[in-house]
Amino acid sequence: MNHVSARSSGRRTTPPRLRAALVSIVTGVVAVGTTVALASSASAGTTLGAAAAETGRYFGAAVAVNRLSDSVYVGILNREFTSVTAENEMKWDATEPSPNQFTYASGDKLVSHAEANGMRVRGHTLAWHQQQPRWTAVLSGTALRNAMLNHVTQVATHYRGKIHAWNVVNEAFADGGSGARRDSNLQRTGDDWIEAAFRAARAADPGAKLCYNDYYTDGQNPKSNGVYAMVRDFRARGVPIDCVGFQSHFTAQSPVPSDYQANLQRFVDLGVEVQITELDIEGSGSSQADSYSRVVSACLAVSRCTGITVSGIRDTDSWRSSATPLLFDGNGAKKAAYTSTLDALNAGGTTVPPTTPPPTTPPPPGDGACTAAVSVNSWPGGFVTTVKVTAGPAGLDGWVVNLPLPSDATVTNAWNAQHTGTSGAVSFRNVSYNGTVGAGAGTEFGFQGTGNGPTGTATCARA
Ligand code: XIL
């Protein structure tokens, strides 16, 4: 659909626009824009968030939590945006600086800000070859795979119910013409690391949409073809993937591709949603404004392109500030690109269909490959726990059980399993002789500790 037909289809979608406006009033996000929208069916949203809401979409920004003390920054954020993505605060190095020791303070601040202002949160990112903590550098093979799965499980569990969509895996495909996976420490743990990460994320937070996110995938090219093949394969095999994020970092050398919309559409045709996740466009003036308009119009023309996130607020907040790639200048003033973006949103387009509600029966804890039944024998000051691992219909060649312990509990020793950590969320992995478990068969391990024994649910997953 070109820009002109997007406009005309926008006029046909008056009832959904009104519906979206009412939703916006209920959530209290965009009161000014909605008042105008209700006054006349031909009226326009006066902020990015209000205008996007008219077709059921969100308009978000990547936010650096340390800038939330800047009143100009926060003023624009709260006025214009309906979704936030943590620029760095939910990445692996930020959330797990030491093995199995998690720090959520910064990410939590962003979530609180979003909740207080009726914004969605996009989680970024659970598994990525960059911005890993230093301690992963010495890990490889099973140890790194388990560390990654534990990370995914713990972080997604911590934010369970608060994240609209998670970028579960980021940038796993190689640049250039191969269409192959990128070489990385995570890739070297085995080709199935991506699906393992998605399964662990689904088990930890069944309500979040789970996305694959990458750059240079914005048009049809060998790299996006590689991602496309993976998503098609995942959908065919029931690997839980709901969405694909297109970072959309554009420069003079790498402008918005002419097949941008067609590329979004072919992913949607695989049964996933798409989102534009880190939009920024190098340049200034009308050429930058035109490029923004093209991107926004393309998303609005694709019914399951559900939202757009720009990779910061003011040019001076950008990770590549010399490219002046954002919608507000360093003083917080609206640029020409802002106006063209708002106009493109107000031109209307397809309306996002209602999302499928999350499953009413939650899937079994873990990835469905196994279950873990816990029995505890405790006495004042100590306990012994026995865990029975039962394999699902496919059998197991390795398993990991995650079990939250009460705050005063410490594991002193374990048998028939090796454990990561001694307190908090402890994970137990098979040892050499009990990783292979036939379909429906079981194996037992145990551990002893001081303090109170576990009362929470154990999750079991393939390792
Ligand atoms: C960038 C951040 O904006 C910077 O603050 C940080 O120093 C490096 O990472 N792809 C991604 C983003 O997925 O998380 C990156 O963000 C930019 C590239």
Image: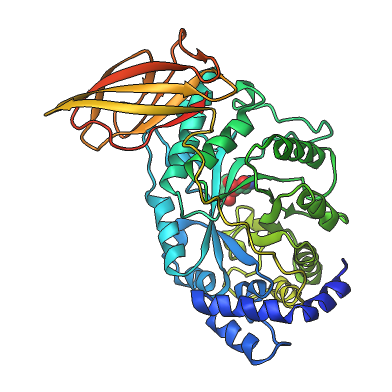
Can the viewer see residue 324 in this picture?
no
Residue at 20%, 32% (x, y): give it.
Answer: 452
Farthest residue toward the left? Answer: 380
Q: Quadrant of residue 241?
A: top right
The foreground one among 339 and 295 is 295
Q: Quadrant of residue 112?
A: bottom left
The foreground one among 251 and 152 is 152
User: Position of 25 compared to 254: left or right?
Assistant: left
Viewport quadrant of the N terminus: bottom right
User: Position of 38 compared to 376: left or right?
Assistant: right
Farthest residue toward the front? Answer: 440
Residue at 74%, 77% (x, y): give it.
Answer: 343
Q: Position of residue 382 (x, y in %)?
A: 17, 25
Residue at 52%, 23% (x, y): give it.
Answer: 463
User: Position of 458 compared to 174: left or right?
Assistant: left
**305 to 208, vertically: above or below:** below
**65 to 458, vertically: above or below:** below
Q: Position of residue 189 (x, y in %)?
A: 60, 22
Residue at 36%, 32% (x, y): give it.
Answer: 403
Can the viewer see residue 434 in this picture?
yes
The foreground one among 293 and 368 is 368
Q: Quadrant of residue 344?
A: bottom right
Q: Position of residue 37 (x, y in %)?
A: 64, 85
Farthest residue toward the top? Answer: 433
User: Position of 434 compared to 62: left or right?
Assistant: left
Q: How many marks?
A: 0
The chosen color scheme is rainbow
Q: Position of residue 335 (x, y in %)?
A: 68, 73
**69 to 173, vertically: above or below:** below
